[in-house]
Image (cartoon, rainbow, N blue to C red):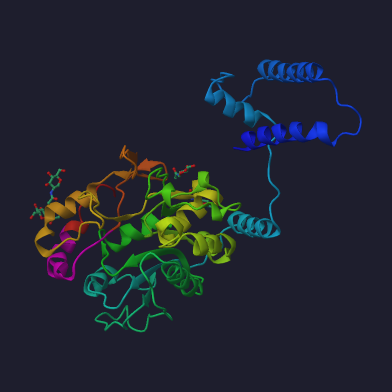
């Protein structure tokens, strides 16, 4: 890209050059010879001193050209004041030592339109672990009626949430803000009303607390539902090569929650240029792109790149599978809790399946702690099976 621009610039200069000179220009053949000599010297020099970082560099192949341009002094653009400020703040937060509080809690943040059909199940999950967790509820439509003491008076101020719009990201940020007010919260989990726990509390607590990474989903989808949603209006701050996709259901370390709160610049780019009904009938959904892209840009090795919340897309429909009461069996729960590989499918014609083993502090572990989408009528079966399926153990 930069190279072609440079080349075009060169051509334009040559057209303008002879006319803008007062004295008669060099005669044409001399010019061409000088130019050819310069290019040849340049190529010879490049050939003799090939780029260090590329083992297979063929000068005239596409790869060679790319390596060639990376060998040139980098044509870095000057960052804006806002970008420099953002990046300084983000780096500072990421590099500052972790504040270890005596007691450490996991914040469970529920994003729901209203009711929480699985409160009873979560109650069972939380029981006996008081002091090691906190609950936050963002109810965007109706105030839910609570059945569990762990949920009473845990609502945060909430606003309307529209599917796929920035208000979804706003609600996530609001939950993080409230949860960050408690310094004992060290890990933050975003859940929906259709989410259920797949493991017992201790397993979840250890899985999240004793690792240094956040489980934020992030992958490259070259297809229409991935990079096809990118808009060049996001330039210069967000380049297409950095654009990522991922499910919104994250878990985050405290420092990552803070950099999300500290960011306004990149957030604003997604708010303005990644939304449904953009120009040319294009749709973009910030909740699927903002955090995956933001973390890829600022702390790629600090995130797992998969979500610990399972969902079944295998039916290939617009929405994932919703589990009904008759689906919920010991067999299903065993299947979901045994998955050891994360998979992403691209949305282009190739439908490339990217499979990666789920690693926890360097060892393979089952991928999932939570699952969605469960319909309310599955509650009874889940209550009956809970002790059984949470004792399925591939670890401990
Ligand atoms: C996480 O980071 C802290 C501080 O940087 C370090 O002491 C600890 O060993 C790390 N834990 C793991 C599981 O890598
Ligand atoms: C996540 O992906 C990025 C590249 O996209 C990679 O650098 C990073 O190591 C991955 N994270 C883990 C934990 O493997
Ligand atoms: C569990 O997985 C196996 C193997 O993939 C499959 O044959 C079976 O139908 C699954 N069972 C349920 C209940 O989903
Ligand atoms: C769970 O239920 C299955 C099927 O009914 C049974 O085979 C298994 O032994 C049970 N496991 C536990 C730990 O109760």
Q: Is residue 139 visible?
A: yes
Answer whether residue 156 is magenta in the image: no
Answer whether residue 382 is magenta in the image: yes
Determine the image quadrant of residue 50: top right
Q: Quadrant of the N terminus?
A: top right
Horizontally, residue 142 falls left or right of residue 217, namely left
Horizontally, residue 357 falls left or right of residue 20, namely left
Q: Is residue 100 visible?
A: no
Q: Nearer the viewer, residue 263 or 102?
A: 263
Name the quadrant where ligand 4 sits: bottom left
Determine the image quadrant of residue 283: bottom left
Q: Residue at x 80, y 33 (%)?
A: 17
What's the magenta region?
371-388
Residue 48 higher or lower than 140, as above or below: above
Q: Nearer the viewer, residue 8 or 140?
A: 8
> Which x, y percent locates residue 331?
12, 52
Horizontally, residue 310 falls left or right of residue 31, namely left
């Amino acid at each position: 890209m930069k190279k072609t621009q440079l080349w075009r610039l060169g051509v334009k200069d040559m057209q303008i050059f002879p006319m803008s000179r007062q004295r008669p220009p060099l005669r044409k053949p001399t010019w061409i010879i000088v130019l050819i000599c310069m290019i040849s010297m340049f190529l010879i020099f490049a050939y003799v001193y090939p780029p260090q970082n590329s083992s297979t560099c063929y000068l005239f192949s596409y790869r060679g050209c790319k390596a060639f341009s990376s060998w040139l002094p980098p044509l870095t653009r000057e960052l804006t004041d806002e970008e420099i400020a953002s990046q300084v703040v983000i780096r500072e937060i990421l590099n500052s030592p972790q504040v270890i509080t005596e007691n450490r809690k996991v914040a469970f943040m529920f994003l729901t339109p209203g009711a929480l059909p699985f409160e009873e199940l979560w109650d069972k999950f939380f029981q006996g672990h008081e002091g090691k967790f906190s609950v936050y509820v963002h109810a965007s439509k109706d105030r839910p009626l609570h059945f569990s003491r762990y949920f009473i008076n845990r609502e945060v101020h909430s606003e309307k949430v529209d599917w796929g719009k920035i208000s979804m990201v706003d609600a996530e940020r609001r939950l993080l803000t409230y949860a960050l007010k408690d310094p004992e919260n060290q890990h933050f989990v975003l859940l929906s009303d259709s989410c259920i726990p797949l493991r017992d509390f201790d397993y979840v607590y250890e899985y999240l607390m004793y690792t240094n990474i956040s489980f934020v989903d992030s992958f490259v989808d070259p297809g229409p539902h991935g990079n096809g949603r990118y808009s060049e209006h996001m330039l210069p701050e967000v380049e297409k090569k950095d654009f990522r996709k991922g499910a919104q259901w994250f878990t985050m370390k405290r420092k990552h929650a803070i950099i999300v709160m500290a960011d306004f610049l990149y957030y604003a780019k997604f708010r303005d240029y990644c939304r449904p009904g953009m120009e040319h009938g294009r749709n973009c959904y910030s909740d699927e792109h903002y955090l995956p892209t933001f973390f890829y840009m600022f702390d790629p090795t600090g995130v797992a790149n998969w979500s610990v919340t399972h969902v079944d897309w295998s039916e290939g429909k617009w929405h994932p599978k919703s589990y009904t009461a008759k689906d919920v069996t010991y067999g299903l729960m065993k299947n979901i809790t045994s998955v050891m590989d994360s998979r992403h499918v691209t949305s282009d014609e190739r439908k490339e399946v990217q499979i990666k083993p789920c690693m926890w502090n360097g060892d393979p572990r089952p991928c999932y702690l939570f699952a969605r989408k469960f319909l309310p009528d599955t509650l009874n079966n889940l209550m009956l099976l809970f002790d059984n399926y949470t004792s399925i153990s591939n670890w401990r």
